[in-house]
Amino acid sequence: MTNIEHATGAQALQNTDVEEFELVILGGGTGSTIAAWTFAGQGQRVAVIERKYIGGSCPNIACLPSKNIIHSAKVASYFRRSEEFGIMKRDFTVDMSGVRARKRNMVSALNGMYLDNYKKTGAELMLGSGRLIGPRTLEVTLDDGGNRRLRGKNVIVSTGTRALLAEIPGLAEAQPLTHIEALELDRIPGHLIVLGSGYIASEFSQAMRRFGSKVTIVARSERLLHREDEDVSGTLQDLFVDEGIDLVMNAEIKRISGKSGESVRVVIEKDGGARTIEGTHLLVALGRVPNTTGIGLEQAGIEVTDTGYIKVNERLQTTAPGVWAIGEVAGSPQFTHVSVDDFRVVHDSLTGGTRTTTGRQVPFCLFTDPEFARVGLSEKEAQARGIAYRLFKIPMEADLRARTLSETRGFLKALVELDNDRMLGFAAFGVGAGEILASVQIAMSAALPYTALRDAILTHPTLVEGLIPLFSSVPLARNAAEAARASA
C-alpha cells in the first residue's frame, strides 16, 4: 500500500468517526436553546453541547433565580413595613435555606420544562465539554464518559461570559462569592462587602440587606450605575442609604485578605487616605469576561476582538464560513432578551431573511425595588450626540396606582424629539417600571408619536396609566437650542 493510499484510508476512517448534523451548537444559553428547538422542530438534525446548565445560565444561575430571591427579599421588606398597611408587626426571621429551597424548586421545574422541549422537538442535548477541532467540527467529552465528533452544516457558538476576577492582591485567595455562589447561600451573611456598582452589585446588595445582612458597597466610580443619568444614580443611592446600605464610592481597592464566608478585610484608598473594611462575606461584581479560551476557536479560523469577544458582523457571522456567534460571547448586550433576538438574526440569515443587529431597540431593567427600566436614549446619550429634545418628567406619586400601593418613590421621564413628536427614549424608576416600559417601547417600535400615549384611554387605576400625566405635563427646556426657540 502506498503512502497516498494509507493517508486516504486514514482520512476515510476519520470521516466515518464524525457525525453529521445540520446544526451544531456549542453552549446551551437561551438564544441557542431556542435555536435548537426551532430548527429541530423544522426537521433538522441538531445537537447542543452544554457543560452544566440545561437552558444555560438564565434559568439556572442568573436572571430567573436571582429575581426569585429578590422577590423573597421584597416579601421580607413587607413584613418590616406591615404597620404601614394596617397590619400589626410581629417578629419574624429569614430562613435562607428556605429561600434557597424556593429558588431550587423553581430551577428544577424549569429544567424539566427544557428537557421536555428537547424531547418534543428532537434536538439532541449533550452534557459535556466541547471544543472546535477544525472547520465546523467539534469534539465533545461527555460527562457520562466517551467522546463524540460532530460536524455541522452550520455551527453556532454561544458560550457566554463569566464573572471577572480583577487582579487585586488577595482577591482570588479570598475565594469571593460571584452571583452563582450568592444564589446558593444557606445563611444570612453577617456583613457582606460588595465590590462593584452595576446591576449585579445593586440587586444583590438590596436583597441581602433586606434579609438582614449589613451591606457595604465598594466601588471606584463616583455613582451607582454611573453610565446612567444623574437623577437615576441619585435616586438609587438615596434608596440604598435609606435602607441602611453603606456606600463607599471613589475608592481604589488596594488589597484583600482573609476568606469569604469566615472573615475578610478590604483595604481601600479614598481621598488620599487608607481605610480597612471588615466583613464576613465578599461578593465580586466587577464585570464580565467572555468564555472564548480553550474552545478551539483558532482551530476553526474564528477570530476574536482585542477584548476577547468573538468577531461578528451585523448578521452575527464569524470570520469562519458557516459559523455564527450569539449572545454575550459575541459582544451583544448582556441581556437574555438580546440573545433571543440574536437567534432571530441568525435564523433569518439561514432562512433567507434580512434581519440584522443594526439599530435594534434594546430595553433593559434593573430589578431593585423599585425597579429602574430604560429604552432608547438617555439624557446623557442625547447630549453627547448633540440631539435636541424635550424632556417630560413627573414624580412617581403622580401615578395614582403607585399611591394605592404605597410605592411612590421614583419618577417617569421621556425624551421627545424637538422638531416633531417622535419619542427618543424613556426611563422609569419606580414600582412596575419594567412593565410600564413595555407599552412605551411598543409605541416607539411602531413609530407612534408621544401623543398616541397621551390621548389613549388606559385602564384606571393601573401603573401604565401614569403615561397620560407624563405626556400631558409641560416639557422642560433641556438644551440651548430649545431654550433659544422658546424665548424667540
Image (cartoon, rainbow, N blue to C red):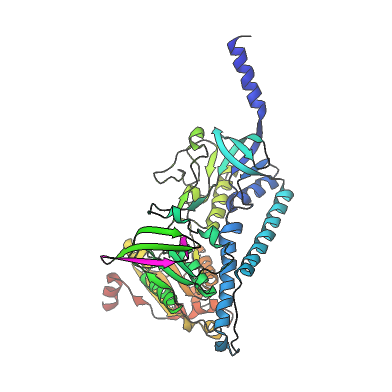
Image quadrant containing the N terminus: top right
Count of numbered badges drawn on the protein: 0
Above or below, comparing residue 178 to residue 145 in the picture? below
Q: Position of residue 50 (x, y in %)?
A: 61, 46
Q: What's the residue at 49%, 82% (across, down)?
A: 408
- Which of the pair 198/456 is nearer the observer? 198
Q: What's the residue at 62%, 69% (across, down)?
A: 99
Image quadrant containing the C terminus: bottom left
Left or right, residue 263 beside residue 89:
left
Q: Position of residue 435 (x, y in %)?
A: 55, 71
**Quarter residue 359 falls in:** bottom left
| Residue 275 among magenta residues | yes
Q: Position of residue 473 (x, y in %)?
A: 42, 81
Q: What's the residue at 68%, 59% (across, down)?
A: 108
Q: Which residues are magenta?
A: 271-283
Q: What's the residue at 41%, 43% (across, down)?
A: 305
